[in-house]
Amino acid sequence: MKEKIAVLMGGRSLEREVSLRSGRRVCEALTERGYRVVPLDVTADLVPALRSERPDAAYIALHGKYGEDGTIQEVLEFLGIPYTGPGVVASTLAWDKAVSKRLFAENGIPTPAWVTFSTAAFKEMGAATALDLVPDAVGGFPLVVKPAEQGSALGLTRVTEAAELPNALMNALSYGDKAIVERWIDGAELAVSVLDGPDGLRVLPPVEMVALSGLFDFSAMYTPGETEYYVPARLDDAVMAEVVRLAAEVHRLLGCRHVSRVDMVVGADGVPQVLEVNTSPGMTETSLLPMAAAAVGINFQELVELLARAALDGIE
Ligand SMILES: Nc1ncnc2c1ncn2[C@@H]1O[C@H](COP(=O)(O)OP(=O)(O)O)[C@@H](O)[C@H]1O
Ligand SMILES: [Mg+2]
């Protein structure tokens, strides 16, 4: 029998159901590959369970808050259990779009123009009196308002006129303390997965998503048939090369290891712009990382084993 792996899944984040779907598939794949698998839902019993099970590694199949923001990573560091995916610092940076976008901008990585608001700026500093400045600050309408720390397009609103802005901000701020107002880029939507193992960094073919509803929202992400996927994305060679270069650069800039998925949009000007980085990409039936891996002949089981091995073998 191979090593014992705890698959962490579920938890209390808004993406719990998605994580359970990812986790179940990961458990099946690892079992098929001969590993001893301990599925663990993230509850108050998690730490005692990890202490008594003493797994050789943890596979993080969690998405969203506490699974992707550095929290579970700190717990695993404390317990001395190697885990899949980026470490504490990279997870923390990637999870907070207000921070990661700042890093992109300061390092020459194109990202849509944006401003960040916190609940405190509204409550303690009178920021609400300056909402009239927002459209110009991000280059006009349409724009998008989203929580700085969230996933799966939750709390996201596309805004086409000033009157909609306050409600969109209130909605985004109901998910967390910070919200981003960002220029909306009309164009191709891409998810670019990066694998980072013993043989170095490998950018998988970019996946292009076309949501039939026009908006790549929660339902479009997880309901089969609501989105068309193109692998590789339909880009001309020069844009494709730039997309691949940017994904690798962003992965390195945030200090990611093992895996990341960089979300981008390519506007009419052909310039790819980075929206965000996911450090625990979905592993469901409709997820983008497994789709990209399949396109280069890495099947789901192989993908899962590759990530588990990165943790077990201590790849930094
Ligand atoms: N500035 C933007 N321009 C165009 N589409 C956007 C923009 N921001 C978000 N979107 C759309 O919303 C989806 C989710 O936004 P994203 O920034 O990736 O956050 P998350 O996936 O963490 O919720 C994107 O995949 C894209 O479809
Ligand atoms: Mg995204």
Image (cartoon, rainbow, N blue to C red):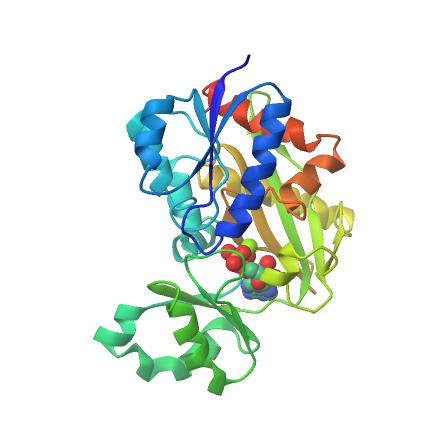
Residue at 58% x, 34% y: name it: 26
Note whether 94 is above or below 194 in the view shown. below
**Number of marks present in the image shown:** 0
Q: Where residue 34 sits: x, y (%)? A: 60, 18
* Quadrant where the image shows the C terminus: top left
Q: Nearer the viewer, residue 32 or 123?
A: 32
Can you name the residue that lies furthest to the left here?
Answer: 124
Q: Nearer the viewer, residue 13 or 217?
A: 13
* Quadrant where the image shows the N terminus: top right
Residue at 26% x, 79% y: name it: 126
Residue at 52% x, 43% y: name it: 250
Q: Where residue 175 sits: x, y (%)? A: 39, 64
Can you name the residue that lies furthest to the top here?
Answer: 1
- The answer to which quarter of the image holds residue 228 is bottom right
Give left or right: position of 158 versus 298: left
- Residue 201 visible at all: no
Note whether 249 is above or below 270 in the view shown. above
Q: Nearer the viewer, residue 72 or 260?
A: 72
Give left or right: position of 50 versus 146: left
Q: Nearer the viewer, residue 11 or 263?
A: 11
- Residue 270 visible at all: yes
Q: Where residue 288 sits: x, y (%)? A: 65, 46
- The answer to which quarter of the image holds residue 187 is bottom right
Q: Where residue 89 sits: x, y (%)? A: 36, 39
- The answer to which quarter of the image holds residue 148 is bottom left
Image region (quadrant) for ligand 1: bottom right
